[in-house]
Amino acid sequence: MTALLSVDGLTKSYGSTLALDDLSLTVASGAVFGLLGPNGSGKSTLIRLVLGFLHPDAGRIDFAGGERTIGYLPDRPAMPFGARLIEYLELMGKLAGLERSSLRRRARQQLADVGLIHAAEWRIGACSRGMLQRLALAAALIHDPALVILDEPLNGLDPAGQHAMRAQIQRIHAAGHTLLVSTHRLNDIAPLCTHLAILHRGQLVRSGAQAELLPLQESVTCRVQPMSASLVMRLQSQFPAADVSPVAIHLSGAACAHKSDVLRVLLDAGVDVIGLDQARTTPEDLYLEAIQGR
């Protein structure tokens, strides 16, 4: 995939605090690139540098073709509460350089896309937190940017609002936009991403395609009544990839494909199965593994 955004050796300090430490990454065109990490890991500093709000101490930021066309959804959008939704989007379109003749049409289309066309004439102050977030998203997309940056897009939203925002991220990606999504809510956003980067104390500790970083690493633990030594040995011989003890059989990765076979052997042997625990590697698991020892 062609790189839309390249960051090389980016370093930024605030006084004696090192916010970014020689950070390099590439965002491919058409990707949903997730910036993962807790508060204070450097995500917001990186975004402000990409937007041009800050200047780096060292390093460079390059956009494909040299043109920086960005839509930005901040963590806490600021809006004029007395304005109507349609007026606000027309203003944002005007500031983005859209032709006057297309402002109203474009604004109404964006409201429709985020599910707010029914509220076009509402005052912004009458909107819920979720509606405000979707309005801010419409404003970020009003000029059809190449790169859409979302900074903590789920913050402050109730479950229904979070569901709506995740659906919007999927819609924007399907429409052909490239997204850079910053979040500390690893398990909520990461499944939507094609690529992930994990930041910790200003450093990039892991980066790559989600399929590479988060394989469907499943694990299964079958808890049983104590088995005889002969049955334990039989299971160990028949399923060498399994971890077998007298009271449990643990399978992980590719070995999980034998789950049904293991259960059949246990049932045929008359063993009482107490429970079956299944789990998959989560983005939080990946993050904790990546920062161990750092």
Image (cartoon, helix red, strand yellow):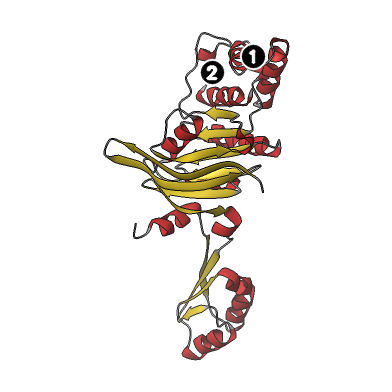
SS label for mark 2: loop
Of marks 1 and 2, which one's residue comes earlier in the chain?
1
Q: Which residue: 73% across, 10% down? A: 101
Looking at the rendered structure, the kind of residue marked 2 is Cys
30 shown above or below 95: below
Residue type at the position of mark 1 = Ala
Q: Between 243 and 17, which is closer to the camera in this rendering?
A: 17
Vertical order, 270 against 156 (above or below) = below
- Which residue lies under the disc numbered 2? 127
**In terms of depth relative to the viewer, which is nearer, 160 or 265?**
160
* Horizontal side of residue 263 vs 21, given as left or right: right
Label 1 CA crowd tier, 10 Å (few <14, some 14–19, many 20+):
some
| Residue 218 spot, x, y in % from top left | 56, 64
Circles 1 and 2, Cβ within 8 Å, touching? The answer is no
For residue 149, say whether it is visible: yes
Residue lying furthest left in this view?
A: 16
Q: Is residue 153 visible?
A: no
* The residue positioned farthest toward the bottom in the image shown: 230
Element carrying mark 1: loop
Residue at image point 55% right, 46% down: 26
List x then y, in percent, for residue 263. 60, 75
Which numbered dot is residue 120? 1
Q: Would you say 3 lies left or right of 76 here?
A: right
